Each structure stands twice: as C-alpha cells, then as structure tokens.
Image (cartoon, rainbow, N blue to C red):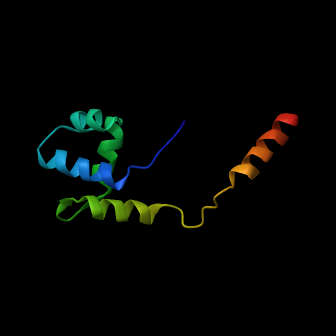
Amino acid sequence: MNYTYLSLGERYQIYALKGARHSIKFIADALGRSPSTISRELRRNKSLRGYRANYADNKAKGRRASNAITIIVDVWDWVVDKLKDG
C-alpha cells in the first residue's frame, strides 16, 4: 500500500469544492482520492468556522510523528539486499 498525505494544494481544492457545495464523492473523483479520505479529512481537520485549508494543513502536520527517522535510500537498498541474501 502506498500512502501519500494530502497536500496544501489539495486541501485548497477541497475547500473550494466544499464551498461550491459539491458532494464528497465528486470532490474525491476530482482529486483522484477515495471518498473515505475526503470524509476523514473534513471530519478530522475542521475548525470552529468550518473547513479551512491552512488550518487543516497545520492540524494534520501537528499530528504527524515528530520523532520519525528518515532512512537514506542507500541504507534502505543495503538492508533490502541483505534481507534478500538471508
């Protein structure tokens, strides 16, 4: 499974399409995302004034792990090779 976070640009599109009163299914199709992704985004990242793109982006980034370690591609490739070798 390959998961990608929603970008700020996608959040602005959600904001605009939601403001134009489009359905979650329509928004999902327009962004090439699952309707459940859009539904969760709207539910998790709304403010007291409704869904706002900047607020949603900041809130989502705040929930991401701050202690996550980025693995260098060369190291990752070395690990994969060693696992394949047994």
- Name the side, left or right, on which 55 lies relative to 62: left
- Name the side, left or right, on which 48 lies relative to 74: left
**Is 35 situated above or below 78?**
above
Q: Position of residue 63 (x, y in %)?
A: 45, 62
**Is 72 situated above or below 30?**
below
- The outermost residue toward the front is 74
**Residue sitting at 29 percent across and 64 percent down?**
55
For the image shown, how many numbered marks are present on the structure? 0
- The outermost residue toward the left is 20
Q: Position of residue 31 (x, y in %)?
A: 31, 38
The residue lying toward the viewer, choosing from 74 and 62, is 74
Q: Position of residue 66 (x, y in %)?
A: 54, 67
- The outermost residue toward the right is 86
| The image quarter in which residue 44 lies | bottom left
Q: Position of residue 57 (x, y in %)?
A: 35, 60
**Residue sitting at 49 percent across and 42 percent down?**
3
Quarter in which the C terminus is drawn: top right
Quarter in which the N terminus is drawn: top right
**Residue sitting at 37 percent across and 52 percent down?**
7
- Name the side, left or right, on which 5 lies relative to 69: left
**Residue sitting at 20 percent across and 65 percent down?**
48
